Image (spheres, helix red, strand yellow):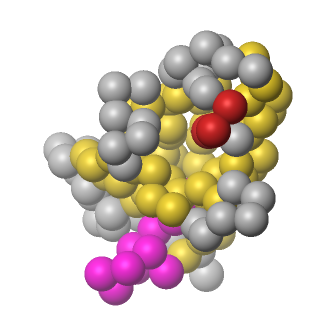
Amino acid sequence: QVQLVESGGGLVQAGGSLRLSCAASGRTLRTNTMGWLRQAPGKEREFVAGISSNGGSTSYADSVKGRFSISRDNAKNTVYLQMNNLKPEDTAVYYCAAKLGSPMYNYWGQGTQVTVSS
């Protein structure tokens, strides 16, 4: 069974940076699309960034383009999200997710809290 464990969240001032990590265990995810989604209080979960299996293709929500960068290290079975120039509206629980045999993200981690103070 796949397990995704996020780390790296925390409290940061506006304009600061954080790097989230997602370590996968249980099976290799080197052939799977991975992504990050987030959910702010009172809002629905939304897509943040995605990366193809070999890292050659990435996609981002318009709200984070130019500020966030997704990457992966398949040798470590780990996906990263570098977040720069953070804004208070980036405050949310960030979830790592994988597409396993599905066009949708169907495996999720427990999430890591990111709080950006103004």
| In front of the other: 95 or 66 | 66
Q: In this view, does 76 lie above or below 42?
A: above
Could you say which quadrant of the image residue 2 lies in? Answer: bottom right
Residue 107 is situated, as x and y percent measured from the top left of the image, at 54, 76
State how many labels appear.
0
Residue found at x 26% / y 55%: 52
Residue found at x 46% / y 68%: 98
- Residue located farthest toward the left when viewing the structure as drawn: 56
Could you say which quadrant of the image residue 109 lies in? Answer: bottom right
Residue 19 is situated, as x and y percent measured from the top left of the image, at 60, 29
Residue 89 is situated, as x and y percent measured from the top left of the image, at 63, 38
Tell me if I can see residue 4 in this picture. no
Tell me if I can see residue 52 in this picture. yes
- Whether the magenta-drawn stretch holds residue 98 is answered as yes
Residue 53 is situated, as x and y percent measured from the top left of the image, at 27, 57
Magenta span main SS: loop
Left or right of 80 on screen, residue 104 = left
Left or right of 57 on screen, residue 69 = right
Could you say which quadrant of the image residue 20 lies in? Answer: top right
The range drawn in magenta is 96-106
Residue found at x 39% / y 32%: 69
Query: In which quadrant will I find the N terminus?
Result: bottom right
Left or right of 10 on screen, residue 8 = left
Residue found at x 34% / y 26%: 66
Query: In which quadrant will I find the C terminus?
Result: top right
- Whether the magenta-drawn stretch holds residue 78 is answered as no
Left or right of 5 on screen, residue 74 = left
| In front of the other: 36 or 32 | 36
Q: Is residue 43 above or below residue 81?
A: below
